[in-house]
Image: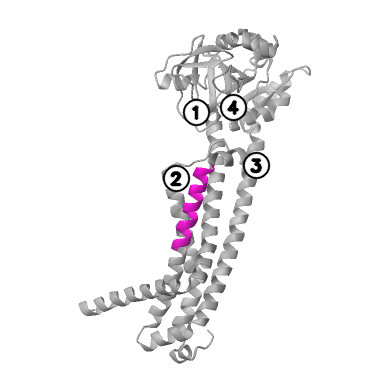
Amino acid sequence: KTASDKKRGYEMKFVTEQMAVKNLRRRPVRTWCMIFFVFMLSAALFLSSVLVESMQGSLQKTVDRMGADVIVVPEEYEREMADSLFLGELCDFTFDSRWVDTVLSIEEIEQATPQLYMASLAASCCSTETQLIAIDPETDFIITPWLEENDLPPLQEGQMYLGYNVAPAEPGKITFFNEDYEVLGKLEQTGTSYDTCVFMTWDTAQQIMDSEQWQLIFRGENDDADSMVSSLMIRVKEGEDPKAVAREINYSLDDSAPISAYTTNGIFSGVTDSVQSMSSYSTILLVVMLVLVVAALMSVFTITINERTEEFGILASLGVSSGKLGGIVLTEGAVIGLVGGVLGAAFAAVALLIFADPIMVKLQIPQLDTSLPYLLALGGICLALSVAVSLLTSLYSAWKISRTRLDNLIKGEEL
């Protein structure tokens, strides 16, 4: 092609794009109705993706961060343990520490460490209402590795480490049951319930139980930390099956034992089922919405194009090729998809950022992934789908326009 032919082609392309935009502006009600369909599809995809992936990510992070294959807890508190680990709900169940030795007699156990859970109060006696967790620094393989990796000093009596989201009223000090304790530092953000916990030694837990405010509230009940354990975290030897080890532990306990051993996946089975159900429901909803949006847009495009046959006939008689006529329709579809996709993703992102806390509470999601790179990447996916759907629905109308004879277009015959 000559330079003049190329220039003429670019000018014609620019003209057709301008015509497509002007056509959309000339019919604002129809245009915004079509944009609304795409908007709903984009927003639904964005919201459901964030919710489902946040739940799946939080669950996986919790399992990975724990590093335990088997967990021993009081048998009637399996669900409470899952809620505590996954959702960060406060709990204070315990069992007699004498059962620990019975469990540790199992040969397939490589490491085991106890934990003691104590719930603080939302009252003047405490800086914050949070989960207090006592650990044994000598056997702990869950919290202690974080400290060693960051060259942080080990816990001593009267000292505490705070989860990432725990904010003390005063730097370097936190108060529980009217007693002040030294804050050694904050742990790195994990995206799990540990971000809202406070960690201490068994000696510090005993200090809290010996405090006057604790004694006043609990009246001497459960005030011997050494005799209590809330959970026993177990790591099995390499090559051993956690399910088999959990069964062996349960078989080794007599009928009077108030505890049971569960695999980590077993503890979270209820949460896993909920995540899978939510994922299935969201997929079904998106498929139904996709079908409805495609059907609605195709119907509107078909009706609109049939109303504009004379317009396309005049353009064709002025020298606009059939390909350019179809290009006008496709451009309109692309614009509708672009605007609807951007508005839907932006609306969903803003709604998530503003209402993140109520959403997490209502849907029991420990943390929403609202990092900028993730939201931008997801927004790009929603935008691409929106444009693809709009182009797909306008493709049939564009094809019909490009295949119809000039005289039929001028007559305004139905396509």
Mark 4 or mark 1: whose residue is earlier in sequence:
4
Q: Choose between 261 and 344: the one closer to the eye.
A: 344
Three-letter amino acid code at the position of disc 4: Asp
> Is residue 108 visible to us here?
no
Residue 343 forms part of the magenta stretch? yes
Q: For residue 69, which numbered disc appears in the image?
A: 4
Q: For residue 274, which numbered disc appears in the image?
A: 3
Q: Specify the segment rendered in magenta.
A: 338-355
Name which residue lies at 39% across and 86% down: 316
Q: Which residue is mark 2?
A: 374
Answer above or below: position of 34 versus 223.
below
Q: CA distance from mark 2 to mark 1?
A: 21 Å
Mark 3 or 1: in front is 1
Percent from the top left, x then y, of residue 312? Answer: 43, 83
Name which residue lies at 60% across and 53% down: 283
| Badge 3 density bin: few <14, some 14–19, many ≥20, Cα 10 Å | few
- The quadrant in which residue 269 appears is top right
Q: CA distance from mark 3 to mark 2?
A: 23 Å
Three-letter amino acid code at the position of disc 3: Ser
Three-letter amino acid code at the position of disc 2: Tyr
Q: For residue 115, which numbered disc appears in the image?
A: none
Q: CA distance from mark 4 to mark 2?
A: 30 Å
Mark 2 or mark 1: whose residue is earlier in sequence:
1
Indicate the quadrant containing the N terminus: top left, top right, bottom left or bottom right: bottom left
Q: Secondary structure at mark 1?
A: loop
Q: Which residue is mark 1?
A: 165
Answer above or below: position of 53 versus 380.
above
In the rendered structure, the answer to whether residue 314 lies left or right of residue 354 reads left
- The quadrant in which residue 111 appears is top right
Query: Does the magenta stretch mainly form a helix, a strand or a loop?
Result: helix
In the rendered structure, the answer to whether residue 366 lies left or right of residue 267 reads left
